[in-house]
Image: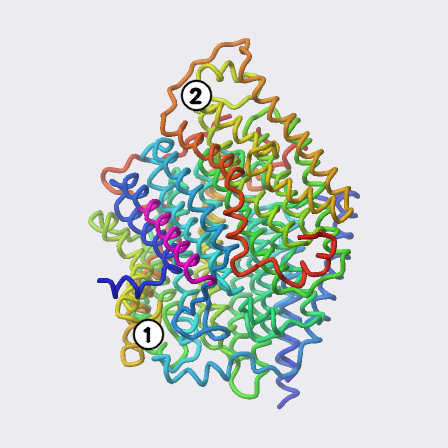
């Protein structure tokens, strides 16, 4: 039964991995991928821990994850188009420099 | 990627350490969770008979937590509005689809539409439902777009817009209608619960499918009276 | 008919109306301005109806679908959520009127549906008692805000929107992970049920850290504010106004709910730390605002500073301090929206927003400058404005509980605010070296800015009423407040 | 039986982590996206293993399929029209 926890830990791993990539890599497409990987990690954690039941797994986190997947693709679609427009306007596929402080 | 200088290397090392601590902490918190936890599964099972469907995930999505799903339809519509608001890509090279793609799409698209309908229908009592059905429908749309098909001019105006909002509109309409009939917001009285859920799901499937395909298309299809691209430069 | 009227729950209307409005605006772009205004009025009316219902019946809890927590989702309205809704309705109405004149029709067709969805997200957020539902509203809010920033077009706005999108998504993901841990610990995501079941386990501490971090990032508390100035400054003026006035407050609201109700009362280290960050924000934001050469950047940094004040209530942690913080939040919403709208007028008028070249706008746009000055009075915290009441309450609690250093921060913040506001007003009276072509500014734009600024002042004159409203359901009478109420008599 | 399951879980978990890493770190963006699609398909497998067939369907169709199509289309637009290097000097 504790393979449940193994998957949950894998989820934590994916979340951290995505976070690292999101911070370190500058290319916007890579950042978008990183966000998606982070999301997948959270989904894995949500669903794996839902299997700590005696019978069928708890369906509530399953429904949450389906909601989450749809939110993720919405955000990804917006991010990708925004990236393309930014490239058109500034010839860059990276975030602008930090504002002067 | 370019070579890293020492400062960047140090930053990454520091970050790695920090994130390892984070991961370890999270892992510890996860492992300290109880080994057995029923969650809400017993409650879902108890109420499943009065939910109108027998697939527990569909019951949660459309009935128990239907309000989330209503707002989620709004998120999907929002993504499309946002993408359209960003104006159109300056130019798009149209490449003729290869013969293989053409044939493949002829074969696959009817299949996808059938699968979509099946998933929508079966979602009431087995794995499936509006989101799965909608995304398969979207896959058919994406294939059509890849094969070079473009929606007709008659469709890209109001008809397309109506299709896009249909899922959310149906959800809101049902939500208000049941209230006017004396029930609570989004409460589905048992004799008609299954029907109402299927109604919402059918509308949602269509909207999800078309919305996702439209997101793939990436910009608003041009209608006759449109005023071209609108990428103004912001004030400097 | 009467029966039908009673069947309707006013609690859901502030969410459903803007959703319907967004769809109508999307379907009928030809009539968009008229439709937008009508819907905005209807939303405001529905919030007013909800206010009457709450005054009549007290705290409202409504189970969507009739299931009830933990299986279903509950809506919850107390004084705190009601005030946020009222604030949103008031500012939203002002911004809507402004936007009618501001946007040409090619932008208006995009602005209105997005703004309606953002409004729906805000109302849904303030009404929800369910943490996962709050996650969905946060995403709806974040994505619509990003799209609205990008509406300005151009490299600067698009870059700022891109950064804002990543920040927003990252914040939501942190929140979602924390929520996952809470759900798997207590089998519910309902705030009230969590409050009963909460225990101090590693998972709860992790959830607390993750959710707080995500929400602080979205609220742009120093030093997580880096994304705010470019996003708020490069957006179109009405969008800047609603971002600064409303959007950042939404994540603060969730944070407040979590800290007040859900998370176990913490040791004082953590709340002191939040207070410290707030103090840094007040000083840093104020100094940066003073250094800016562009008006909208100045106002954006002022938002960073003003958000800092909200966190000074955490270490003080009495009911009065929370009320002061909330009072500041609402008056900031009114004043800052007025300020951004006024800046939009100046920008439209002169074609730029360089502070040193404002060129006698005092004579040429007196109403706009009056709006800016009145809003400035509230931002500085001078009587009789709403900002004054908020600061006064915080100051009072700080001095009575002997934590005078927070009082010093409050005073320094006011001085800095006075410095950057007078810097703008000073230039508005002087003549620039180069005379500029001036463009006519719509009266509607001038008046909506002015009325919002006036509302920020009036808020200081009617203070007993909002303060009494805050007591409905006594949202601040919780464990976190109880830890150090002893310092204040009342 | 349990040994087999454990082996399956371990292999799947580590493959997921490895694929995620390669997705994010690969020099070539196209390769990264293809790996991401593979990652999505393996996630679908994990959902099946975790008794979540509804999510498996959604993930296969949305997570891997449509997201992959969106990413590939975006990459095509990113590389096709303007053949300029990515790191042009900052402009502002």
Along the viewing direction, whichever of B21 and D62 lies nearer the viewer: B21
Q: Please give the name of the residue rendered at 46% of the width and 43% of the height, measured from the top-left corner.
A: D80
Q: Farthest front residue?
A: C490
Disc on res. B188:
1
Does C394 appear in magenta?
no
Same chain under badges 1 and 2? The reply is no
Q: Please give the name of the residue rendered at 57% of the width and 39% of the height, measured from the top-left corner.
A: D86
Percent across and percent down for residue C282 are 68, 38
Q: Please give the name of the residue rendered at 42% of the width and 16% of the height, measured from the top-left corner.
A: C438
Residue range of the region highlighted in magenta in the rendering: C39-59
Along the viewing direction, whichever of C480 and C241 lies nearer the viewer: C480
Along the viewing direction, whichever of C85 and B53 lies nearer the viewer: C85
| Residue D23 falls left or right of residue C400 | left
> Which secondary structure, mark 1?
loop
Q: Is residue C313 visible?
A: yes
Along the viewing direction, whichever of C126 and D76 lies nearer the viewer: C126
Where is C24 relative to B19, above or below? above
Question: Label 1 neighbourhood size at 10 Å, few (<14), some (14-19), many (20+)?
Answer: many
Q: Are marks 1 and 2 in contact (CB under 8 Å)?
A: no
Mark 2 lies on residue: C349
Q: Please give the name of the residue rendered at 46% of the width and 67% of the height, measured from the top-left corner.
A: C74
């Amino acid at each position: 039964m504790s393979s449940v926890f193994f998957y949950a830990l894998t989820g934590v791993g994916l979340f951290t991995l995505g976070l690292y990539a999101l911070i370190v890599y500058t290319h916007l497409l890579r950042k978008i991928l990183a966000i998606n990987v982070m999301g997948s990690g959270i989904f894995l954690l949500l669903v794996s821990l839902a299997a700590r039941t005696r019978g069928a797994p708890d369906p509530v986190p399953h429904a949450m994850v389906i909601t989450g997947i749809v939110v993720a693709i919405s955000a990804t679609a917006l991010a990708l188009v925004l990236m393309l427009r930014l490239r058109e306007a500034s010839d860059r596929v990276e975030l602008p420099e930090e504002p002067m402080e | 990627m370019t070579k890293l200088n020492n400062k960047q290397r140090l930053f990454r090392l520091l970050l790695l350490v920090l994130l390892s601590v984070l991961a370890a902490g999270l892992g510890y918190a996860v492992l300290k969770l109880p080994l057995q936890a029923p969650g809400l599964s017993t409650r879902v099972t108890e109420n499943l008979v009065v939910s109108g469907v027998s697939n527990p995930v569909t019951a949660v999505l459309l009935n128990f937590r239907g309000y989330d799903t209503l707002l989620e339809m709004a998120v999907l519509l929002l993504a499309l509005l946002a993408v359209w608001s960003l104006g159109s890509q300056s130019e798009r090279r149209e490449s003729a689809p290869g013969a293989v793609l053409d044939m493949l799409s002829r074969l696959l698209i009817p299949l996808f539409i059938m699968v979509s309908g099946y998933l929508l229908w079966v979602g009431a009592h087995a794995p499936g439902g509006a989101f799965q059905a909608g995304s398969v429908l979207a896959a058919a749309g994406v294939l059509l777009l890849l094969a070079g098909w473009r929606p007709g001019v008659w469709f890209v105006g109001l008809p397309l817009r109506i299709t896009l909002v249909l899922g959310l509109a149906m959800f809101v309409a049902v939500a208000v209608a049941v209230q006017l009939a004396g029930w609570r917001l989004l409460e589905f009285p048992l004799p008609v619960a299954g029907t109402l859920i299927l109604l919402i799901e059918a509308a949602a499937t269509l909207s999800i499918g078309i919305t996702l395909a439209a997101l793939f298309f990436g910009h608003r299809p041009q209608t006759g009276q449109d005023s071209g691209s609108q990428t103004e430069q912001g004030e400097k | 008919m009467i029966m039908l009227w009673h069947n309707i729950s006013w609690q859901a209307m502030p969410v459903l109306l803007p959703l319907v409005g967004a769809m109508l605006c999307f379907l009928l772009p030809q009539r968009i301005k008229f439709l937008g205004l009508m819907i905005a009025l209807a939303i405001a009316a529905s919030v007013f109806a909800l206010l009457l219902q709450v005054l009549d019946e007290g705290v409202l809890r409504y189970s969507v679908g009739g299931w009830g927590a933990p299986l279903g989702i509950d809506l919850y309205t107390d004084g705190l959520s009601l005030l946020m809704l009222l604030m949103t309705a008031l500012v939203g109405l002002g911004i809507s009127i402004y936007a009618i004149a501001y946007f040409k029709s090619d932008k208006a067709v995009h602005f209105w549906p997005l703004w309606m969805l953002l409004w729906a997200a805000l109302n849904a957020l303030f009404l929800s008692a369910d943490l996962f539902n709050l996650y969905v509203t946060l995403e709806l809010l974040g994505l619509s805000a990003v799209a609205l920033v990008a509406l300005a077009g151009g490299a600067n706005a698009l870059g700022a929107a891109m950064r804002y999108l990543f920040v927003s998504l990252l914040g939501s993901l942190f929140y979602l992970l924390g929520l996952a841990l809470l759900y798997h610990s207590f089998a519910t995501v309902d705030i009230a049920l969590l409050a009963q079941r909460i225990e101090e386990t590693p998972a709860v501490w992790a959830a607390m850290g993750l959710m707080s971090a995500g929400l602080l990032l979205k609220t742009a508390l120093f030093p997580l504010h880096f994304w705010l100035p470019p996003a708020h400054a490069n957006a179109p003026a009405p969008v800047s106004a609603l971002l600064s006035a409303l959007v950042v407050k939404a994540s603060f609201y969730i944070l407040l709910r979590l800290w007040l109700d859900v998370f176990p009362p913490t040791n004082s280290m953590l709340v002191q730390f939040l207070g410290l960050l707030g103090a840094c924000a007040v000083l840093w934001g104020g100094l940066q605002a003073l250094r800016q050469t562009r008006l909208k950047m100045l106002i954006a940094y002022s938002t960073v500073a003003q958000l800092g004040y909200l966190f000074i209530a955490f270490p003080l942690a009495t009911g009065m301090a929370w009320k002061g913080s909330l009072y500041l939040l609402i008056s900031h919403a009114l004043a800052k929206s007025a300020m951004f709208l006024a800046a939009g007028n100046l920008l439209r008028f002169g074609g730029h927003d360089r502070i040193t070249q404002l060129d006698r706008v005092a004579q040429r746009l007196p109403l706009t400058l009056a709006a800016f000055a009145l809003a400035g009075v509230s931002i500085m915290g001078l009587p009789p404005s709403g900002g004054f009441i908020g600061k006064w309450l915080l100051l009072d609690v700080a001095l009575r509980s002997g934590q005078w250093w927070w009082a010093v921060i409050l005073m320094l913040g006011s001085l800095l605010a006075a410095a950057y506001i007078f810097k703008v007003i000073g230039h508005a009276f002087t003549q620039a070296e180069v005379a500029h072509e001036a463009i006519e500014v719509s009266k509607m734009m001038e008046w909506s800015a002015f009325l919002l600024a006036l509302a920020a002042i009036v808020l200081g004159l009617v203070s007993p009423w909002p303060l009494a409203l805050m007591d409905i359901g006594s949202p601040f009478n919780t464990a976190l407040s109880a830890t150090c109420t002893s310092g204040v008599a009342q | 039986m349990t040994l087999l399951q454990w082996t399956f879980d371990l292999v799947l978990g580590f493959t997921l982590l490895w694929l995620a890493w390669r997705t994010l770190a690969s020099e070539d963006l196209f390769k990264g996206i293809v790996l991401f699609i593979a990652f999505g398909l393996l996630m679908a497998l994990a959902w099946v293993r975790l008794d979540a067939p509804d999510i498996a369907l959604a993930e296969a169709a949305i997570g891997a399929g449509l997201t992959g199509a969106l990413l590939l289309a975006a990459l095509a637009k990113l590389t096709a029209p303007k053949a300029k290097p990515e790191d042009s000097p900052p402009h502002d």
